[in-house]
Image (spheres, helix red, strand yellow):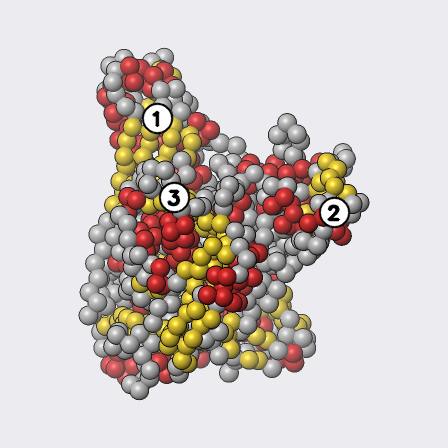
Amino acid sequence: MQSVKAKGWRNDAVAKVTGRAQFTDDLKFPDLLHAVPVYSDHVHAKLLAVDTTAAEASPGVVRVLTSADVPGANRFGQIIRDFRIFADDRIRYHGDVVAVVVAETREQATQAAPLLRVEAEPLPVLLDPEEALKADAILIHENHGSNVINTHRVRRGDVQKGFARADLVIERTWQTPFIEHAYMETEVSVCFPRPDGVLEVRGSMQHPFSTRRFVAACLGVPLAGVEVVGMPLGGGFGGKDDTAAIVCARTALAAKLLNRPVKMWYSRECSIRESYKRHPYRVYYKMGLSGTGEIIAVACKIIADGGAYCSVTPWVTWRSTVQCCGPYRVENVHCDTWGVYTNNVVSGAMRGFGSPQMNFVVESIIEEAAEKLGMSAIEVRRRNLVRQGSVTITGQKLDGHTVAMEQVLDRVLEAIDYENKLKKCSRGAGDEQYGIGLAMSYRGVSLGAEGVDFCAAIVNVQADGSVILDVGVHENGQGAETAMSLILARELGIAVEKIHYKRSSTSTIPDSGTTVASRGTIMGGGAVALAARELKTKIANIFAAELHCAPEEVRFVDNHLLGKEENHALPFAEAMRRMFQQQQFPYALGVYRAPRVTWDEESGQGNAYFTWVYGCQAVELTVHKKTGKVKLLNAVACHDVGRAIDNTLLLGQFYGGMAMGTGYALHEDLQIVDGKIHHANLNRYRIPRALDLPEMKAIVVENFDAVSPTGAKSIGEPSNEIMAPAIANALYHATGVRHYTLPIKRTPADGTKGGR
Amino acid sequence: MQLTVNGIVREIPEAWIEKSLIRYLREELALTGAKIGCEVGACGTCTVLVDDRPVKSCLKKVGEMAGASILTIEGLAVADGTLHPLQQAFIDAGAVQCGFCTPGMILVAHALLLRNPGPTREEIRRAIHGNLCRCTGYQQIIDAVEQAAPHYHEF
């Protein structure tokens, strides 16, 4: 790897360590108005009237907005347009916003909010998705025809014959919870009408283009009439898409109607109450195996609680369906998946996107099956793992890249000394019980058949050799801007400090989709690399003769263009200056288009993703028998990332993902009672703190993937999706008790909730 | 009533006495490095140092700060912009991701290193336990504090 930067360098690091980084709430404008959302206390009700009179008469209040004020579409969404900018016909969950109060100060807006009068007629509340599937259930969206948001399926082989042949059939039910993203920065937006007629939107969101669609639809203006400018984002993890876009839409509406800048900042309570979560899953899973440990058949029913609105439930549940058997070859599969409307908080995208739930299921049952067969769980995994050329449960042949499943497994087993430590597990004996556990997964990269998948990058070299880089991916905190800049610096052979990454704006770069699905590096980086290569070809054609070589022989090294001989060199900056003199722009647009994927919804078969990544994680822990207290001692993760762009950033993704997975396994619980979230702030909703986590070890495997222009693939989600089953398996080896419900609650004296 | 913020002595305006310190810093003094994450003292993004001790500024009223000396993240770097060694260590170790917890995290670490310039990793964990970070899993933050520690022997 060519060194183009100092250790740890990030383009935004100095601003962030000095407090100078300006997040959205740090923006100040003269004449700024403040808006706050107003909810009703209903969970499901027919909305009869909203009386704004008293609130509007409150000191400092400028206006109270409701659905009646929306000039464009009050209903919008990425898949089904059922999200309400403001509740109009019904209140469908406790976080449905009825109105927004706009006042001169935030205090005044907050004081006026309780004065809003909502007249509503309560409706039966549906909180269990299986109840919602019953024929006599009340329809949450009366025109939708049922409470089914979507279904997916996999049909492969003949499961009945498969189970008939099996020596062991094991059947279990799992339940996973809603999970709050708990980004440290809550939702916030600042919008202002510009003199050029454009409505400018700033905000804490990870999808400027989706936000622009929401805003433009709500205002009833063309896409070009809205400019969404990215700001430093205080964490997203998939969670700053729909809700963040709607917050921006409401703010934009206020700014447009009042012709003044408006800020809407969410308190943590509002954020947790309203924002979408990771889907809770109930999974009925049946696995049949031969006496020698081959998985013969899997039948599963996956029920995902989508909450009150569709959001991206069809996409989330699609990934769960495609990956419902984990990284194993299974000839006979029958999977049915439902995304279901309920009156719970909305479920949507969160790091993992439908995989953490299924990995918990699959990586638990395979261990239980191995034990019943009297075999090592590692051995059972090895017998079934996908290998080079294997065919997945959706009929996709894994080739064209290195299938690294065994490689990552072996690295983890060795690094943590798994086999020896497994023998030392307490299995229920003693007061301080020790356990080690492991889990693995494969994961389809980027969107797959979820949607159109391509990305743009613009490399715009200036006459002095400095570069402006604009890419259609968004900085969510992960270091995307830095990674893009490094890719360009290496391609052009220039110092990374010469590159200015232009903060994303929807008005300067084509809509490249959303920075989700761990697709930033592969898609954005791919576009940058392709732009750089196109630009290099253009430059080489101009200067090759002078460098005494053919255009394809020109190299870009150490801020120079080099010919075949070292003495034929031209400083990069000098070449750029001369290009301008020759009426040539050193400018290129790179477009990386994801290779084609296929999917047949009827059979649930197809080449679901254009490439895959492979990971394995293991954890050691102790459980105190009397108190139930779990202490993590050590954790190791190994992932094949294709190619590391920057080691420091990469390790940050490993550790952060593992930490979040720990919270999923052991801590995080919203305590939803009767559709209302009780743990609505960070003092009650407990995300991992420093003492909750062990020292973590990251092992990076790099099998260059030719489908990616940079060779790099994904890490953001893979690192997050298998920690929970690794912990569950370690807990089993420590205590002898299996858990089928997350978060795992160990109560004193080994009583277990969720165990069986 | 007076307080000192980043070395500058300030008169506490009457209107701010009963209001929270975080709002005073952010709104009155435009020191927006300290962030608002929960307003219940759970997340630590609003952390500042009061007489060298970490304080969650969302829980304190400005009036309680009479006579105190407050350090915010804006006061840590040298006036000419040179980063404090702890800030540089946060960059070198990759302790910064989204950056929202970073100001508070640096300040709790600074307070720790002022009183204990050779902490163990466990002691660092204990010191930052009150500050949440959702991005990093804390590991590179702990690395950064460890790397910066030797600089504190010179103070």
Reading the chain from its start, which is encountered first: label 3 or label 1? 3
The local crowd at label 1, few if under 14, some if 14 to 19, many if 20 or more residues have their Cα within 10 Å, is many
One can see residue A629 in this view: yes
B111, A400: nearer the viewer: B111
- Indicate the amino acid at tag 1: Val
Residue at left offset 37%, top offset 83%:
A131
The local crowd at label 3, few if under 14, some if 14 to 19, many if 20 or more residues have their Cα within 10 Å, is many
Residue at left offset 56%, top offset 78%:
A736
Question: Mark 3 highlights which residue?
Answer: A193
> Are callouts 1 and 2 both on one chain?
no
**Residue A283 sits in which quadrant?**
bottom left
Question: Mark 2 highlights which residue?
Answer: B50
Marks 1 and 3: in contact by CB < 8 Å? Answer: no
Q: Give the label, 3 or 1, closer to the camera.
A: 3
- Indicate the amino acid at tag 2: Val
- At which x and y percent is residue A18? 60, 38
Vertical relation: A444 (above or below) A226: below
Q: CA distance from mark 3 to mark 1?
A: 32 Å
- At which x and y percent is residue A209? 33, 49
> Are callouts 3 and 2 both on one chain?
no
Residue at left offset 33%, top offset 45%:
A226
A368, A146: nearer the viewer: A146
Question: Mark 1 highlights which residue?
Answer: A461
- Output the chain of dot 3: A
Q: Quadrant of the N terminus of chain A?
A: top left
**Residue B58 sits in which quadrant?**
bottom right
- Indicate the amino acid at tag 3: Pro
